[in-house]
Image (cartoon, rainbow, N blue to C red):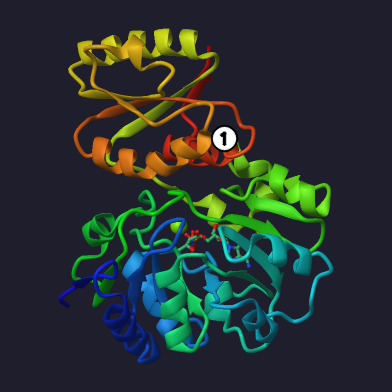
Amino acid sequence: MKTEVISTIRMEDAGTTLGAELIQNGGLVAFPTETVYGLGANGLDGEAVNRIFEAKGRPNDNPLILHVAKKSDVTKLWAHVPKLAKSLMDTFWPGPLTLIFMKADEVPYEVTAGLETVAIRMPSDKTARLLIQKSGVPIAAPSANRSGRPSPTTAEHVLADMDGRIPLILDGGPCRYGVESTVLSLVGEPTILRPGAVTREMLEAVIGPVRLAPSILNPLGESEVAASPGMKYKHYAPDAEVHVVEGDPKPAAKRIRALYYAYEAEGKTVAILGTEQTMQSYRNLNAYSLGDRDEPETLCTNLFSLLRDVGAHCDVILAEGVDTANTGLAFMNRLLRAAGFSRETV
Ligand code: TXA
Ligand code: MG
């Protein structure tokens, strides 16, 4: 299969019309969102949804998110309205917040991987919304990477993973946030299953106390498998091995320098992912800045892209850990998973 790439910056109308035709005919389309690129199919067609799992090599017990173009589209997809839903949707939709509800009968089990719950989000990206609207159905879409790889934040990343596997990629340029949406379960106590740009602090300002799933900064415990199926798989792994050093910036940078020379002495190619605050300490070393520790959203925007690009050219990546307040939590959640929890604190 030949994979066509259409720039929606130049040809949004033609690109989304072609994309919508493919979706209506049971095909797959990769498209930009404000978080990461998604790989979409008709979310009401179980067979079309199965093609997503094939193209990604995704385990079929990991459920997908349904993307809607307007708030009222959820009423056909949920079984009943949880009491906190309205204020959350009014505050954070459209945007990077996925909500988990009890599902309506119309939602196929292929989407929910057999669960009675369904994940739904309304993206703020204009191209994504136009594609959904023209398709006339909710679009089921995971991140458009091969399973286990870092999520794609550019059309080039999607092409690297999906060339020859899907007919169309809509190229809307780099994604604004760079990490996937916050996943908040409204089934039972409000619980964040995956942190994102809509932070715990922001959610609590609207609905009061919100729990964090314990697996966010730790490997998954046995009892959690049912709550967030996606968490049990290897995630975000670049071609290189990743090791995380947490702690105050100065001692962390010192330890990273020492590790850098130790790996080099073993004959390995090493790269450092530092921050604006520490780049000085890595002069003359193969180091890249993730962004500003005081603005962790900058770290989120650059993480996946650096893991892919830098990881393709080295054996070991040494990365700095940061504080987990606000969007620091989403950053550390993805970084620790990319590292397979290889971490130390100085
Ligand atoms: O930002 C995003 O959310 C991107 C863009 C494309 O919208 N999508 C995305 O999808 O990240 P994916 O499939 O890579 O991640 C979906 C996550 C997985 O961790 C999955 O286990 C969880 O949401 N999930 C989906 N449905 C669920 C459900 N019913 N119960 C619990 N977790 C669910
Ligand atoms: Mg994913």
Question: Seen from this angle, which residue lies furthest left?
Answer: 2
Q: How many marks?
A: 1
Q: On the rendered structure, is 276 left or right of 9?
A: right
Residue 34 appears in the picture as rendered: yes
Q: Position of residue 337 (x, y in %)?
A: 48, 40
Residue 340 appears in the picture as rendered: no
Q: Position of residue 78 (x, y in %)?
A: 70, 79
Q: On the rendered structure, is 8 left or right of 102?
A: left
Q: Position of residue 24 (x, y in %)?
A: 39, 90
Please give the residue where the numbered disc 1 appears in the rendered image: 328
Looking at the rendering, which quadrant does residue 158 occupy? bottom left
Q: Is mark 1 within 8 Å of ligand 1?
A: no
Is residue 275 positioned above or below 7 on the image? above
Residue at point 48% right, 88% down? Answer: 45
Q: On the rendered structure, is 271 left or right of 224?
A: left
Label 1 packing within 10 angstroms: few (<14), some (14-19), many (20+): many
Q: On the rendered structure, is 185 left or right of 135?
A: right
Looking at the rendering, which quadrant does residue 288 occupy? top left
Residue at point 42% right, 57% down? Answer: 36
Is residue 286 positioned above or below 9 on the image? above
Residue at point 37% right, 88% down? Answer: 26
Is residue 25 positioned above or below 275 on the image? below
* Ligand number 1: quarter of image: bottom right
Q: Considering the numbered disc 1 on the image, is that residue within a helix, a strand or a loop?
A: helix
Q: Amino acid at mark 1?
A: Gly
Q: Position of residue 89 (x, y in %)?
A: 69, 66
